[in-house]
Amino acid sequence: MTIDFRPAEPDRLPDFVGIADGIDLSRPVTQDEVAAIAAGMDRFAVLIFHDQAIDDEQQLAFSRHFGPLEHAISHGIARQHQRGLAPEIADISNLGRDNTVLARDDRRRLFSLGNMLWHSDSSFKPTPAKYSLLHARVIPQPGPLGNGNTEFADMRAAYDALDDETTEQCRDLVCMHSQIYSRGLLGFAEWTEDERARNQPVPQRLVRRHPGSGRRSLFLSAHAGEIIGWPVPEARAFLRDLNEHATQRQFVYAQQWRGGDLVMWDNRAMMHRARRYDPAAVRELHRTTVADSAPTLQQAA
Ligand code: OGA
Ligand code: MN
């Protein structure tokens, strides 16, 4: 069976989110399948694989076809060891050591609420993320306290829709990205010396060109808190305007999770954010993250 991609919303977002059919990720994939998926990622920026019954080992094996994997614990606050997951698995859950829901004021929970701000994964690392692969293990029912969706915003379309003056203004800008900054936006401010040392701000280009599609995009993220050479308030006001522009509903797809969904996204081309859900319900997803090849300043503009 060959893999086939179709737009999830053909009328509204024909080139943003694709649904992949005809592949079972619990089995080893062939080089042809890997090439087809990479090409699908270049056309879309998000691919959805439904009904994938895979465990961590299978997710790791599939993910490694696309490049070296990040270690989940290098910059975050310690979570991994709590539930015995592999170092390359980011624990995107609200569970603690004994697999029970974290207390409302648990530090790890409060840290993870940073995912509710529009961001691009690991933009706070010198070499940010290329792909993220997020697999749904336990999904809460949508309810009055929220739907637990993940939303994706197309930063290529947002770039294309800028007016000429703003395009010109953005062209050569470099932003400083830091997790200390983004978490601070939500009032999360308690860091150990060691965590601070591991989270020094890093420079990233604001406009990137995608090597696969040739399309330019805005490399925005909640972690971006400064623009090199600009006064800080002016930079933050400008970035806020850009974020407002880039996350208008016409650029956004909302993923309503089903257990077994694996969603793969290209952090070079879009932003994403988590949405609220009942804090008493279990939500468990596992993420693997493929590192990009070089810092954005070393990539062709
Ligand atoms: C992530 C992330 C959003 C969510 O895994 O990188 O931002 O909805 N997740 O859990
Ligand atoms: Mn994320």
Image (spheres, helix red, strand yellow):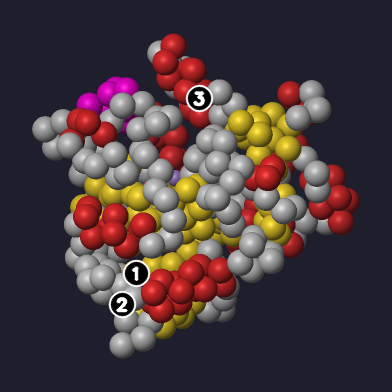
Do residues under tags 2 and 1 come within 8 Å of each other at their CB atoms?
A: yes
Amino acid type assigned to the residue bearing label 1 in the image = Phe
> What residue sits 35% from the left and 50% below the top?
288
In the rendering, which numbered label is found on residue 199?
A: 3
User: Dot 3: few (<14), some (14–19), or many (≥20) neighbours within 10 Å?
Assistant: many
Q: Alpha carbon of mark 2 to alpha carbon of mark 1: how far?
A: 8 Å
Amino acid type assigned to the residue bearing label 2 in the image = Ile
Q: In which quadrant of the rendered image does the N terminus lie? A: bottom left
Q: Alpha carbon of mark 2 to alpha carbon of mark 3: how far?
A: 38 Å
Mark 1 falls on what kind of element? strand
- Is residue 106 a member of the stretch shown in magenta? yes
Q: Nearer the viewer, mark 2 or mark 1?
A: 2
Magenta residues, start to end:
100-110
Nearest to N terminus: mark 2 or mark 1: 2
Q: Nearer the viewer, mark 1 or mark 3?
A: 3
Q: Position of residue 53 (x, y in %)?
A: 19, 65
Q: Position of residue 207 (x, y in %)?
A: 72, 50
- Please name the residue that numbered disc 2 is placed on: 23
Nearest to N terminus: mark 1 or mark 3: 1
Whether label 1 lies within 8 Å of ligand 1 gets the answer no
Provide the major secondary structure of the magenta segment: loop
User: Dot 2: few (<14), some (14–19), or many (≥20) neighbours within 10 Å?
Assistant: some
Amino acid type assigned to the residue bearing label 3 in the image = Asn
Determine if residue 190 is in view.
Answer: no
- Please name the residue that numbered disc 1 is placed on: 49
169 to 39, vertically: above or below = above
